[in-house]
Structures are given as C-alpha cells and as structure tokens.
Amino acid sequence: MLETERLRLRQWKDEDYPAYARLNADPMLMRYFPSALPVQESHEQADKLRSLITERGWGVWAVELKASGEFIGISGLHTQAGDSGIPHAPLTEIAWRILAANWGKGYAPEAARRVLQFAFEEMALDAVYSFTAQVNTPSQRVMIKVGMKNTGEEFNHPKLESGHELERHCLYVLTKERWLATNR
C-alpha cells in the first residue's frame, strides 16, 4: 500500500468493482479511450489489475480517500512489451483515472507523484513513461504537473485503426535523474 496526505493506493477489494465500472462507463472520462467498457469487461480488467499486484507486488492500484475510504479511481504502473508498437518499449508507464466527481481536487497528480516515488526509489527504474491521445489535454496537464517532459515523439497508437480520432498520441517521460533532482 502507498499513502499520500489524502490518498491510499492499495490492492483492489470486491467492493471497488461497481465504482470502477461506473468510472469506465462515464462518457466524459472515457472520451479519451476508444470506448466505454461494459460492466463485465470492467470487472475482468479489475481482476487482471488485482492479480498483477498479487503476483508482482505492484501495478495499477485502487485509489481511495483516506478520510472516508471511498474508491475514487486508479493509479499505478503498467508495462508495455517491446513488441507493443509504443516508442521506447519495453517500458514502464504510469497511469491514472479518477471519477469525474473528484476532478479538480489534485488527486491525480498527488497519486501519480507517489507512484513515481515508488517507481524510482523502490523499483529503481531509470525512466517512467506516459502516453495519451493528443487531444487529451487534461492528462497531459497531470503529466506536466508531476515533472514529466514531452519527448516530442508523436505516434499512431498501434491498437487504433487508421483515421480514428484518438489515433495520434504523444509520449512523455520522467527520468530517475530528473526526478531525483527535483525531489531531494
């Protein structure tokens, strides 16, 4: 489990699944993803995230408010294989997704900063990447807030068909060296 001043990043619980399904069905949030997820797919994804944490001790954690124990989203680390089609792969990426009712409160950057600390101090990674559709400026703002830099490498997401409105992606990175320079 990872903690911040206001948040707890932890292993998944069965009671997180309905809120996670709501998050994955929210049209405002999912406008930057190819499609919203049906409940069953959302539950299967949560099962996978949960099992990866059990296997490795890290992954994409459930995020809850410390004050109430309420599930508000996800944040954590995920790997991209060398044959993924993502520039610089194999790589470790950081991810986050927060329920819309909790937007604008700084929870995504707060969780992401703690995940980055874990990545560099406990996993000893040399770099952490993040990528998103070019139109996803809210996520790009979070990337910038946590110290990531745009690599300038734009690419077509390999899992999206040519011409899809979300096809074009941007890639951000934070190196351990840069993180240490700004967090020590």
Image (spheres, rainbow, N blue to C red):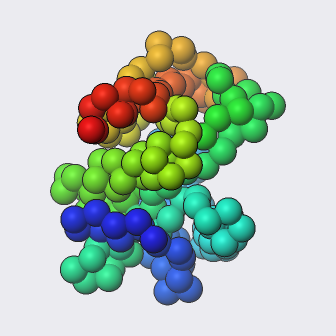
The one of 125 and 62 positioned closer to us in this rendering = 125
Q: Residue furthest front?
A: 184
**In the displayed structure image, the side of residue 168 where residue 100 appears, left or right:** left
Q: Residue at x 56, y 49 (%)?
A: 123
Question: From this viewpoint, is residue 166 visible?
Answer: no
Q: Residue furthest bottom?
A: 15
Q: Is residue 163 above or below residue 180?
A: above
Residue 5, by quadrant, is bottom left
Q: Residue furthest right?
A: 83
**In the displayed structure image, the side of residue 127 where residue 50 appears, left or right:** right
Q: Residue at x 73, y 27 (%)?
A: 85
Q: Residue furthest left?
A: 105
Q: Residue at x 41, y 66 (%)?
A: 2
Q: Is residue 41 above or below residue 145?
A: below
**Where is residue 120 shown, x and y percent of the image?**
47, 43
Question: From this viewpoint, is residue 36 visible?
Answer: yes
Quick one: quadrant of the C terminus? top left
**Where is residue 61 shown, x and y percent of the image?**
50, 65
Residue 93, by quadrant, is top right
